[in-house]
Amino acid sequence: MHLKPKIVWIDGIGCNGCSHSFFNYEEFDNFLDDFELLYHPLLYFDNFEKKSDILIIEGALREGFKRNNKNLIKLIEELIINSKFVICLGTCSSYGGIFGEGVMFNKKENGIFYDYKDKIINIPGCPPHPNWLGYVLYMIKEQQEILLDELNRPKEIFAFTTHAGCSRNEYFEWKIDSENFGEKEGCLFYYQGCQGPFTHSSCNRDLWNGVNSKTRAGTPCFGCTESCFPKNELFKTQTLMGIPANIPLGVSKRAYLTLSGIAKSLKNERLSQKLFEYKDKK
């Protein structure tokens, strides 16, 4: 490992959203001082160097797809072999996204480069928070151990659910749902499609731009860090007999039904009131 780690950033099939997210990294100037970026598809470089300390792969894979007039999969295999660490940045690279063909995983199945799992770190998200990549890069630079879960995701980021730190948790506990998007009151889980209770991320602990998150802005979590993303009907909760079909992680359905019934029967008058007056949009 070089004192100033060398990075090659390659793009598969994607929208470059992960790159644009990281370009908003608050410590981006320090990143450029502390790392040597050998290649990035959105920036100009004279040469394309294949040997690196860290390979960052953004975007999904596809058999027969070409980059730089080379077969994408063969190019990535060559780059993986010539790197010490591989970071799969974003849900497309981590799980395959819409195409379902990722680096280590194809959704939940083992992907074409699963055998290189010992050097792969997955950072899913659509896009991932810039701090997530920053954390991994500096841990590698300082030669610190990064604890990973069974999907090779950093536990420091993905051991928690998006629900942790949500400003609507009190409404969730009392089963009071939001009636409209964009409001401060109410939970978004019961009718509005929020997947925060079973999505792994630190979005409500490490706020976006340091100030906000989807749920704090009144929009449901779409579960973009999970292998099942994207889903249909993102703004609608699938229910069975009026109860969400997918329940929070670690709770049995019978226990959840019991708790939900008790919470709904004990109406919380304070939380049932509006905190703000909203003007009708004309």
Image (cartoon, rainbow, N blue to C red):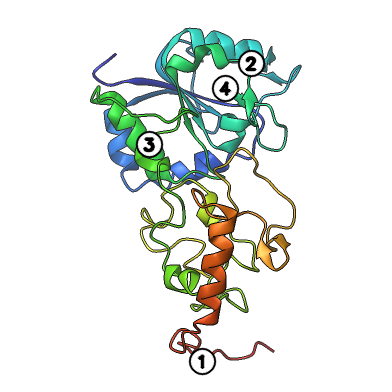
Location of residue 134 in the rendering, given as x and y in whole percent from the top left corner: 35, 37
Counting residues from the N terminus, which is met first, the one under dot 4 or under dot 1?
A: 4
Amino acid marked by disc 1: Glu
Secondary element type, mark 1? loop
Q: Few, some or many C-alpha atoms within 10 Å of disc 3 (few <14, some 14-19, many ≥20)?
A: some
Can you identify the residue that label 2 sits on? 112
Tell me the CA gap for discs 3 and 4. Answer: 17 Å
Residue 277 is marked as 1
Counting residues from the N terminus, which is met first, the one under dot 2 or under dot 3?
A: 2
Q: Is residue 217 visible?
A: yes
Q: Reply above or below: 166 against 37.
A: below
Tell me the CA gap for discs 2 and 3. Answer: 24 Å
Location of residue 34 in the rendering, given as x and y in whole percent from the top left corner: 27, 29
Amino acid marked by disc 3: Lys
Counting residues from the N terminus, which is met first, the one under dot 3 or under dot 4?
A: 4
| Quadrant in the rendering for residue 167 | bottom left
Secondary element type, mark 2? loop
Q: Tell me if label 3 and label 4 are in contact, CB under 8 Å.
A: no
Seen in the image, is 191 located left or right of residue 146?
right
Tell me the CA gap for discs 4 and 1. Answer: 49 Å
Residue 104 is marked as 4
Counting residues from the N terminus, which is met first, the one under dot 4 or under dot 2?
A: 4
Secondary element type, mark 3? helix
Q: Is residue 175 visible?
A: no
Counting residues from the N terminus, which is met first, the one under dot 1 or under dot 2?
A: 2
Residue 155 is marked as 3
Q: Nearer the viewer, residue 181 or 129?
A: 181
